[in-house]
Amino acid sequence: MRTSGLTRKTNETKISLSLSLDGSGKSNIVTGCGFFDHMLTQFAKHSKFDLYVSCESDTDVDYHHTVEDVAMLLGRAFNEALGDRRGINRFADATIPMDDSLILAAVDISGRGYLAFDVPFLSERIGDFDVELVEEFFMTFVRNSSVTLHLRKLAGNNSHHTAECLFKAFARVLRDASSLDSAFKNDIPSAKGVLR
């Protein structure tokens, strides 16, 4: 089964996270940040991954450590759950709308962590959530999952819609790229023979 369960405890955060790539989109997310919980719930729903996150952190400071450390564990869990990547699609892209927002996302489960993020926001905060943490989430995820991810805003004025559209597009491309491809069956989709 393509699953992973990880924990992390520091002076700033205490996190438990479990991920199943072959789930049904079930989730239970408690991070202490309502907006981030909402984004991760959307991610689970639209990826069809089962995701459980419990996080206690120094939210009296801000949400930076919460977002960064959850993204770190999610990236590592995704990396671990994929195993040797045998039989996966590897590549995926999607253009996802949400009201005024339109996001293009493309991913390569390449073994190389890289983020191209061209998503300007028109406000600095969504409620009490700093929008700069959206890019921080994706940057930390790619560093720890070793995937190449391109995200680009094609349209959008409402920052909440833009962020939510990003997480939905991210979910869809990860789901499609990590899905098993019958054309490859037990093969690793790389001329090198490895995606690590």
Image: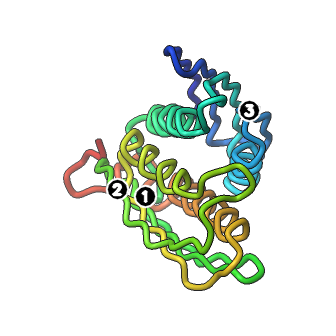
Give the secondary structure at mark 2: loop
10 Å crowding of disc 2: few (<14), some (14-19), many (20+): many
Give the quadrant of residue 90.
bottom left
Q: Amino acid at mark 2?
A: Pro
Q: Nearer the viewer, residue 19 or 74?
A: 74
Residue found 43% across the figure and 44% down from its top: 140
Q: Amino acid at mark 3?
A: Gly
- Most extreme residue toward the front, as rendered? 61
Q: Nearer the viewer, residue 89 or 20?
A: 20
Q: Mark 2 and mark 1 in contact (Cβ < 8 Å)? A: yes
The tag on residue 32 is 3
For the residues labelled 2 and 3, the Cα–Cα distance comes to 39 Å
Q: Whole-percent x and y of residue 89?
A: 47, 59
Answer with left or right where residue 11 lies relative to residue 124: left
The tag on residue 189 is 2
10 Å crowding of disc 3: few (<14), some (14-19), many (20+): some
Q: Nearer the viewer, residue 74 or 131?
A: 131
Determine which residue is flagged by label 1: 90
Number of marks? 3
Residue 88 visible here:
yes
> Does residue 105 sit above or below 13 in this rendering?
below
- Most extreme residue toward the left, as rendered? 192
Answer with left or right where residue 121 lies relative to residue 101: left
Residue found 52% across the figure and 58% down from its top: 182
